[in-house]
Image (tube, rainbow, N blue to C red):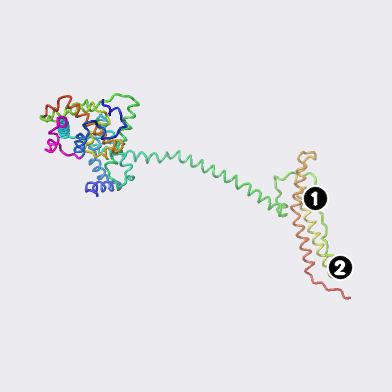
Amino acid sequence: MQTSDQHDVRILVARSLQGDETAMLALVERFQCLVFGLCLRMLHHRQDAEDVTQETFVRVFRSLARWDAERDFKPWLLAIAGNRCRSLLAAKKNRAQPTDLVDDIPDQSPDLQAGKNLAEEVELALRNVRQEYRQAFVLFHEQELSYGEIGAALDVPVGTVKTWIHRARKELVDQLRQRGVVEEVR
Amino acid sequence: MTREANNPNANNPDDLGPESEFARRLDEALDERRSLDDPQWLEAARDDAGHRELLEGYRALGEGLRQRRARPQERPSANLAVRVLSQLHDESSLEKKSLAPPPSTMSFARAVTWAAFAAAACLVIAPLVYFQIGTIQVVNPVAVKQTPAPEAPQIAHVEKTPVASPVPPSVAPDAPRNDPALRALMAEAGGRYLALAQETRESFAEVAVLLPSVPARDPQAEAKKQWIDQVGDGLKPVTRSVGGAFDFLLQAIPIEEPRS
């Protein structure tokens, strides 16, 4: 069953294929936060994430004619973004250059008094979780992607995504319990 | 790092240890993005301290995630969409430029190509034209007489050729030879044939005389003699055709049977 959201995306894609730049702009603006969030979670570097987001959309428009309109647009888009991120990570690994991790960037978000400590505890716990687990967990719980979309983005089977997320939860809960966070909120 | 973390290929979500059953139910609830604040969870964990602690841990995690989601979403630069279109424009114009090489290079390459093509065509056509013209010159005695080929080998002496032997054609053995009219006709035809043969011989001799002489000991003399024989062979059809015409004429003439 095709939702109205998917229908809108198909219309934007069709108009983009005809060279309608307004539609192309709308398509980018519609998905840029999603793609940027994924890139930021995978690359941990704001500028790299921005560059890869831009490159992802350029590639999307170049190969838009090959997109199967019978399938959902978002997993296809996220798969391209995930591939771009992995390519960059592989290149950086070969170059072995130090990068500015997004985790080291000061949090400029407003101070949410009641949940601030708990959010920070989760943040600290996430740093100790294996990278693949963390990526899958954050994409599911913060970016609110489905298992299928995460699998497409990370290029792994849905079962693996599910396992990674379950293990991330377990490790996070264990860490929160060890830190005494659970007693504090009880 | 946990045991599971050291095994990246393990993908069985049920392999989570002794608390797996309750944890699995909690996981399922989170997979379906359901809240853990439902009283049924407290009821389920009421009799088990471990379950209660696990539930509180998942609730704490859920609350921490909720707080994180409440933060402003990370956004890329405001002009990202414009930059994407700009890059697409730049790449498309670059591709157009790369498809059109500099005009001077193209014209030079085109000129070279055409020159090579023309040379190849000339190499193919020239031998055909040469042989065709050569055939015409050999077959046509008039052409040989009027335009002696300058490339023809030089001839010192022409003594005997198979062309210049004006032998009268043989007459049918059964033809009546005692008819005066027939004899006169044969004499006339034979005379014309002899005149034609003589003319042919003189023409060929004229061609040979017009050519400058070469030393007799020239190493190519033998080859030139062969060339002369070939020219004579080429002229044979002319004499044959004359003889054939004479025979045809004899057969076509109505002849009266001698009265006995």
Tell me the number on the disc at residue B161: 1
Tell me the number on the disc at residue A138: none
In the image, B257 versus A151, the foreground residue is: A151
Q: At x 70% / y 47%, what residue is drawn?
A: B149
Question: Residue A100, position in %: x, y?
Answer: 25, 25
Question: Residue B37, position in %: x, y?
Answer: 12, 36
Are tags 2 and 1 found on a single chain? yes
- Report how many numbered discs are placed on residues in the image: 2
Q: At x 23% / y 40%, what residue is drawn?
A: A29
User: Does the segment drawn in magenta span residue B45?
Assistant: yes
Q: Helix or strand or loop: what does disc 1 sit on?
A: loop
Q: Give the amino acid type for the residue marked by disc 2 in the picture.
A: Arg
User: Does the segment drawn in magenta span residue B260?
Assistant: no
Quadrant in the rendering for residue B59: top left
Residue span colored magenta: B32-52
In the image, A24 versus A181, the foreground residue is: A181
Q: At x 20% / y 40%, what residue is drawn?
A: B32
Question: Residue A169, position in %: x, y?
Answer: 21, 32
Q: Give the amino acid type for the residue marked by disc 1 in the picture.
A: Thr
Which chain is indicated by disc 1? B
At label 1, counting other C-alpha atoms closer than 10 Å, the crowd grade (few under 14, some 14-19, many 20 or more) is some
Q: Helix or strand or loop: what does disc 2 sit on?
A: loop
Please identify the quadrant where the C terminus of chain A is shown. Answer: top left
Mark in front: 2 vs 1: 2
Mark 2 or mark 1, earlier in chain: 1
Tell me the number on the disc at residue B177: 2
